[in-house]
């Protein structure tokens, strides 16, 4: 069996250790095992481990200091919008309702304004991308994976249509939320729920297409409120309440 390249080893360590930190296996403030022991347990060389530590440090998860070792930083210092950090938290085995609700809170802050901006700034190409994604959502109503992909494309197209580089970059967080919600069983397949969800996305897409900024904002708020109820209902179901 071919041994992974150094780059492959680095990525493997970053993902493995990052996932453990996100899952709480390495608690905030804890010190990682000494370098050689950790490298041996992960089956990589010390050079690969050191490079992986640099990557994780850049994401705000760990810090290193002489005589103190490598420690897990407080969660408040983690770069939670980093695509990798988001994915580690969204792992269906460890993703929590709290994580989804926190993501929903930041979506509530950013996405209504993004839709409002899109209604005033969207180009013809932007509008076409938004409406095409909505058409795909409608076409794949009962093919949940295809519908999920279309849903992600729709929200991505809206964020891009805001023509604000910082807002556009939020697409990774939205995609992570939608995938995590789907994977942990938060997607309600009830016919009435699916119909309402589609109507809400229709109203957002067409508000933007028609240049109605206030409606785009208000409809996005409604959609996110509907999404929150779904997350809370999934949490109650999981708890057996």
Image: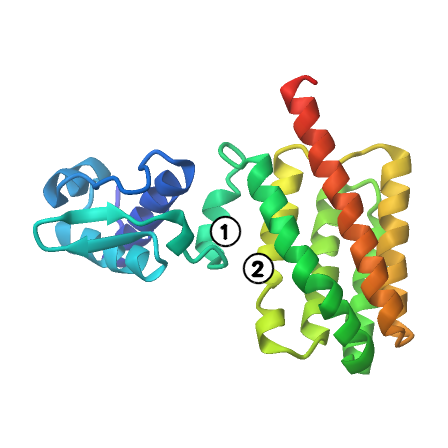
- In the depicted structure, whether residue 220 falls above or below residue 145: below
Q: Residues within 10 Å of mark 2 (few under 14, many from 20)?
A: some
Residue drawn at the location 55% of the way across and 35% of the way down: 96
Which image quadrant is residue 40 in? Answer: top left
Q: Choose between 106 and 183: the one closer to the eye.
A: 106
Coordinates of residue 185 in the picture (x, y in percent):
67, 32
Coordinates of residue 112 in the picture (x, y in percent):
75, 63
Q: Choose between 7 and 164: the one closer to the eye.
A: 164
Whether residue 50 is visible to the viewer of this picture, yes or no, is yes
N-term mark: 2 or 1: 1
Residue drawn at the location 71% of the way across and 75% of the way down: 162
Q: Are marks 2 and 1 in contact (CB under 8 Å)?
A: yes
Q: Given the current orientation, which residue lies at the most extreme left position? A: 67
For residue 194, side relative to residue 26 (left or right): right
Q: Choose between 132 and 91: the one closer to the eye.
A: 91
Residue drawn at the location 60% of the way across and 36% of the way down: 97
Reading the image, the residue beneath label 1 is 86
Q: Secondary structure at mark 2?
A: helix
Q: Residues within 10 Å of mark 1 (few under 14, many from 20)?
A: many
Q: State the quadrant of the C terminus.
A: top right
Reading the image, the residue beneath label 2 is 172
Coordinates of residue 16 in the picture (x, y in percent):
34, 42
Q: Secondary structure at mark 1?
A: helix
Coordinates of residue 106 in the picture (x, y in percent):
62, 56
Whether residue 3 is visible to the viewer of this picture, yes or no, is no
């Amino acid at each position: 069996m071919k041994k992974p390249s150094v780059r492959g080893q680095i990525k493997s360590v970053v993902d493995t250790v990052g996932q453990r930190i996100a899952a709480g296996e390495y608690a905030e403030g804890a010190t990682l095992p000494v370098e050689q022991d950790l490298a041996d347990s992960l089956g990589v060389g010390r050079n690969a481990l050191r490079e992986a530590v640099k990557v994780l440090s850049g994401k705000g998860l760990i810090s290193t200091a002489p005589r103190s070792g490598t420690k897990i930083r407080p969660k408040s210092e983690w770069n939670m919008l980093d695509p990798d950090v988001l994915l580690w938290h969204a792992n269906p085995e460890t993703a929590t309702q709290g994580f989804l609700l926190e993501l929903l809170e930041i979506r509530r802050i950013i996405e209504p304004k993004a839709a409002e901006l899109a209604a005033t700034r969207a180009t013809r190409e932007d509008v076409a991308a938004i409406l095409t994604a909505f058409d795909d959502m409608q076409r794949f109503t009962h093919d949940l994976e295809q519908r999920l992909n279309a849903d992600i494309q729709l929200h991505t197209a809206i964020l891009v249509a805001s023509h604000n580089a910082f807002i556009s970059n939020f697409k990774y967080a939205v995609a992570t939320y939608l995938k995590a919600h789907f994977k942990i069983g938060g997607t309600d397949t009830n016919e009435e729920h699916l119909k309402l969800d589609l109507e809400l996305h229709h109203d957002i897409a067409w508000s933007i297409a028609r240049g109605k900024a206030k409606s785009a904002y208000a409809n996005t708020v409604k959609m996110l409120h509907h999404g929150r109820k779904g997350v809370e209902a999934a949490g109650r179901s999981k708890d057996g309440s």
